[in-house]
Image (cartoon, rainbow, N blue to C red):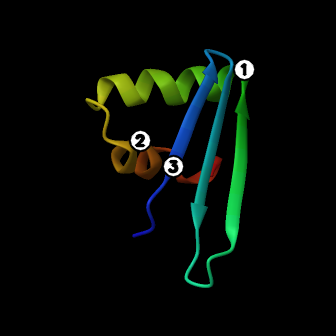
Amino acid sequence: MKTLHYTIVSEEMVWLWYYDELRAKHFKELLDYDARTFIKELNASGGEVPAVAERQKQTY
């Protein structure tokens, strides 16, 4: 599994990114509802990003 990096810019903006096997960067910006949901699920999972990503695959 790839390492998913994130930065919480505000409660309505989250930046997600990972690097593929060719070291290309893939970036996604979550806004409004998606950002709040990500933060809520991140807190509920105890900070485990893979658990949040698994529940919201369609978002990424």
Local crowd size for mark 3, using a 10 Å CA cut-off: few (<14), some (14–19), many (≥20):
few
Looking at the image, is 19 positioned above or below residue 22? Answer: above
**Amino acid, disc 2:** Val
**Cα gap from disc 3 to disc 1, whole angstroms:** 19 Å
* Residue holding disc 1: 32
Q: Disc 3 marks which residue?
A: 5
Image marks 2 and 3: residues in contact by CB distance under 8 Å: no
Q: How many marks?
A: 3
| Residue with the most extreme left position | 46
Which residue is at 57% across, 60% downward? 18
Which quarter of the rendering shows the N terminus?
Answer: bottom left
Amino acid type shown at disc 3: His
Amino acid type at circle 1 is Asp
Q: Is 11 situated left or right of 2 in this image?
A: right
Q: CA distance from mark 1 to mark 2?
A: 17 Å
Q: Which residue is mark 2?
A: 52
Q: Earlier in the sequence, mark 2 or mark 3?
A: 3
Q: Position of residue 53 (x, y in %)?
A: 46, 48
Residue 24 horizontal side relative to residue 42, left or right: right
Q: Position of residue 56 (x, y in %)?
A: 51, 45
Residue at the location (54% across, 41% down)?
6
The reply to whether the C-beta atoms of the residues labelled 3 and 1 are less than 8 Å apart is: no
Q: Give the spatial CA distance, label 2 vs label 3.
A: 12 Å
Furthest toward the top, the residue is 11
Which SS class for mark 3? Answer: strand
Image-quadrant location for residue 16: top right
Q: Classify 10 Å Cα crowding around label 2: few (below 14), some (14-19), many (20 and above).
A: many
**Closer to the eye: label 3 or 1:** 3
Q: Secondary structure at mark 1?
A: helix
